[in-house]
Image: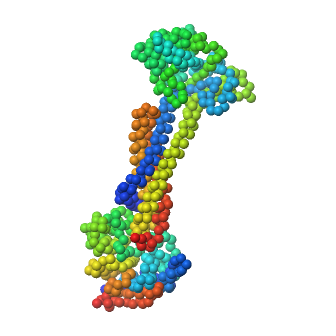
Amino acid sequence: MNNRASDRSILTIRDVVKTYQMGETYVHALRGVSLDIRSNEYVAIMGPSGSGKSTLMNIIGCLDVPTSGTYSLDGQMVAEKSESELAEIRNRMIGFVFQTFNLIPRADIFHNVELPLIYGGVPRQERRRRTERAIEQVGLADRMKHRPNELSGGQRQRVAIARALVFNPSIVLADEPTGNLDSKTGDEIMRMFDELHSSGQTIILVTHEDHVAQHALRTIRLRDGQIESDVRNGDVQAA
Amino acid sequence: MKILIDIVESLKIAWSAIIANKARGVLTTLGIIIGIVAVTTTMTAFNGMQAAFRQGAAAIGADVIYVSRMPWIVMNDFFLFRNRPNLDLAEAQALERAFERRAIVNPSMHNRQDLRFQARTLEGVDIIGTTEKMPSTSDRMPAIGRFIMEFDVRYKKNIVIIGSEIAADLFGEIDPLNKEINIGRYRYRVAGVMEVQGGQTFGGPNFDRQVFIPISTFVKNFGGRRNSDVDIAVKAPTIAGIEDLEYEVIGEMRKIRKLRPSEPDNFSINKLDSLLGAFNSVVGAVLGIGLLVTSISLFVGGIGVMNIMFVSVTERTREIGIRKAIGAKPRSILMQFLFESAAICLIGGLIGITIAAGLSVAINASGLIPASISPGIAVTSIVVAIVVGVFSGLVPAWKGAKLDPIEALRYE
């Protein structure tokens, strides 16, 4: 079950450096990171705060571009893209799941999940079909017309997962997905990620919690903007 | 297709944003409402004045040109015309001969005299000496009785056809027909009463306060060749022929007056067009100033909208971050906020037009000027409202579109 990762590298990062200028000083958030992630891998990126894991996530998620180095996602060189093109890549290839859910409060569940398809220019009929399917997939078919504030935290995160999946992204990128949930609900959400992985989805978790990272099959630890360790933990998963 | 989906989505967002902030929307819209009411009412009043003027001037006839000593509208070069010779009846008759069977030529002369019937006197009434051809060159006909006839002119009859207001003022409930009245020192018999023309129009003559007598009688009683000036109306056979006719009339008049080619015309050609032109340029200037002043209120309204849009963008920073993360392009965010401010202004515009329509009904009822809101004005106002909305939204929307998604997502 855990050997389905293909040889095809979906994400290739080479010598990525990210430097921020804060006033007079330069902050080196990433100091030369190289990394390959293949299709259907289940990866946890860990590290203490200040290690550069948020910066790496932003770059992987195409919310930011590296100062130097290259990043190719599904064959596309991200560093050279314009803002609009990056938006398009995020739209088509990346499904974000955030710690704080980040649903749009005024819109109902259906509309929240539908949104990526709208920005992707998918025609109405197909939008409806795909949105309904994604919501059913996370078990909230009876909540479609509800607003986010009418749902529990776990349900909201499931909506966020539905939104992340609705456009069949190349990777699901989850940033502390259980950070705002109690442990029981957090476990439910993690089981959902496990299922997604077994159905073939590539998943990248960004977390500082070991028990969350243990769900993944590979753990990358960052420290001071560099990769400290990169280990496969398939055995742990099996246990 | 893609852009269409973007637009539909932007409209939905705009609508839900407005619904979510009703009180704020109402206050913001108020500025636009006031601006649109002001602009629309100004345009409506202008339209009304123009319509009233046209109606009043219809008696002049669009297919008629008038040869006179002076132009109707003298702006500031009065001295150029001051020394022109009067037009006299002989010249009118010469012109009539020149256009025999080609056009109707009708001379008329003006004077002011007191009118008296029994104990009632009207002072300084516009007396017009003319011929039986006048109804052909203008649209004016008698409502009761008859107009001047050829034999009245030939035999210098002392008959008079009076305007509708004169009839009401002088006779009240009494039937004026065949009553004797005094014009100056002379006695006239009332032969007819003219149709109502529509009363006074801005500075122009009040056609309902004129009385008509045969031109021959006019010359005998009031004229004297020397101090009386003849106006000659020439009616084109078709309205399309009026320009050719104008050149021919100028040519014939120059021949009659034996002007050398180097000499300028010493008479003027007047027509409805030139009157309308002068009217439009005067009222147009007033309209321009009015619109300028009212635009200021619209401008202030626009600033209000801009302000609220800045608030709206800041409030929704996080939402912008979310939208960007899941694939909204800067263009989509820009459109979202532009649609919102345009929608606010559109709603304001529609309310404003409704109020302005009510106002114009009230103005109409007051009888001051016949104001009526036209589809053209309504469409213009709506377009203006939308343009104001787009311009007010531009800078805030741009600010939103340019937000860094990472920063925006972090915003609390």
Q: Residue furthest left?
A: A142
Residue B32, x across and y down, in percent: 44, 50
* Identity of the residue drawn at 32% across and 79% down: A178
* Identity of the residue drawn at 28% across and 64% down: A145
| Position of B327 relative to B92 (above/below) | below
Residue A50, x across and y down, in percent: 44, 83
Viewer-closest of B147 and B201: B201
Q: Quadrant of the C terminus of chain B?
A: bottom left
**Does residue B338 appear in the picture of this structure?**
no
**Does residue A146 appear in the picture of this structure?**
yes
* Identity of the residue drawn at 33% across and 81% down: A197
Q: Quadrant of the N terminus of chain B?
A: bottom left
Residue B191, x across and y down, in percent: 48, 13
| Position of B279 relative to B187 (above/below) | below
Image quadrant where residue A115 sits: bottom left
A43 with respect to B165 (left or right): left
| Position of A8 relative to B130 (above/below) | below
Viewer-closest of B266 and A168: B266
* Identity of the residue drawn at 68% across and 24% down: B84
